[in-house]
Image (tube, rainbow, N blue to C red):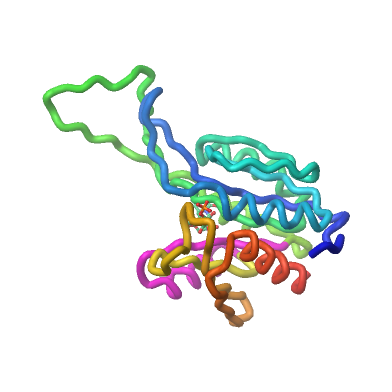
């Protein structure tokens, strides 16, 4: 890992949650901390890659000079930033937990409480990984993530195919210490070739190294 095996390579990483505005003070979001994606960006940067990190709202800091962080809030903003970085990126890792839906008409002013119940209508967000997957060249490598609560393998394999990933990393909500927020993760990698491998519970730093090693072996 001390090696410079990614020098001269450009990478794109999406990480963290997205926030979809309901009104100026409220949003729809999720529990992603950004830790997993930032650890992957750092691992590639240490190995000499130039990394564009498109990061949703997150407390995670990174100081590696090879990482350019583009801070975004919504799925639409994350898409626009990723779209810009994608053509130059040989390695693309989609670790973000992107909201699939956003309020169709965010209110301009704070929504006032009334005596009635309230419904918010939602519109579908663009799928960043799937859209960039349609424009993937033969030189580009795409890695996706899946966080599932049920039918894990089936759902992960469907996303692997639909989004044109070279491999997908499944973290299960059923595994203690895996997924959102923890400093640890336990993953299963499903390759498009059909090969699969499961890791033990490791720090997200070690999981990141394992994921990047898997990419490098395949390039
Ligand atoms: O940030 P942490 O707290 O460290 O947690 C890490 C993580 C659990 C968020 C991360 O490891 C992870 O699993 N991220 C994907 C979460 C997820 O639920 O993905 P998904 O099943 O909604 O989407 C599948 C893939 O498509 C992902 O690569 C996702 O980034 C991508 N996607 C999804 C929807 C969308 N609109 N655009 C996308 O690019």
The quadrant in which the N terminus is found is bottom right
Instruction: Name the residue at 54% across, 40% down.
Output: 58
Position of residue 78 relative to residue 157, above or below, is above
Instruction: Name the residue at 71% across, 63% down.
Output: 141
Left or right of 159, for residue 4? right
The quadrant in which the C terminus is found is bottom right
Query: In the depicted view, which residue is nearer to us: 23 or 213?
Result: 213
| Residue 185: x %, y % from top left | 52, 64
| Residue 34: x %, y % from top left | 55, 48
Left or right of 30, for residue 64? right
Residue extending farthest bottom:
195
Residue 210 within the magenta-colored segment of the rendering: no
| Residue 97: x %, y % from top left | 49, 51
Where, by quadrant of the figure, is residue 112 drawn?
top left
Instruction: Name the residue at 58% across, 79% down.
Output: 197
Position of residue 136 relative to residue 80, above or below, is below
Query: In the image, which residues are magenta?
Result: 141-164
- The mark tally for this picture is 0
Query: In the depicted view, which residue is nearer to us: 6 or 119?
Result: 6
Residue 150 within the magenta-colored segment of the rendering: yes
Instruction: Name the residue at 44% across, 67% down.
Output: 172
| Residue 192: x %, y % from top left | 61, 75
């Amino acid at each position: 890992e001390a090696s410079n095996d990614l020098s001269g390579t450009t990478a794109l990483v999406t990480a963290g949650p997205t926030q979809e505005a309901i009104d100026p003070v409220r949003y729809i979001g999720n529990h992603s901390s950004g830790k997993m994606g930032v650890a992957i960006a750092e691992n590639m940067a240490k190995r000499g890659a130039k990394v564009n990190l498109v990061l949703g709202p997150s407390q995670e800091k990174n100081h590696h000079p090879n990482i350019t962080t583009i801070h975004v809030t919504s799925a639409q903003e994350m898409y626009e930033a990723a779209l810009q970085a994608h053509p130059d990126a040989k390695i693309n890792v989609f670790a973000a937990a992107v909201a699939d839906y956003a309020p169709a008409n965010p209110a301009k002013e704070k929504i006032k409480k009334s005596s009635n119940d309230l419904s918010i209508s939602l519109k579908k967000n663009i799928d960043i990984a799937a859209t960039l997957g349609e424009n993937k060249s033969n030189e580009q490598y795409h890695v996706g993530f899946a966080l599932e609560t049920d039918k894990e393998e089936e759902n992960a394999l469907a996303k692997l195919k639909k989004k044109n990933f070279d491999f997908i990393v499944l973290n299960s909500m059923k595994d203690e210490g895996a997924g959102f927020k923890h400093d640890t993760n336990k993953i299963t990698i499903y390759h498009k070739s059909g090969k699969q491998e499961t890791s033990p519970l490791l720090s997200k730093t070690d999981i990141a190294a394992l994921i990047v090693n898997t990419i490098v072996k395949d390039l």
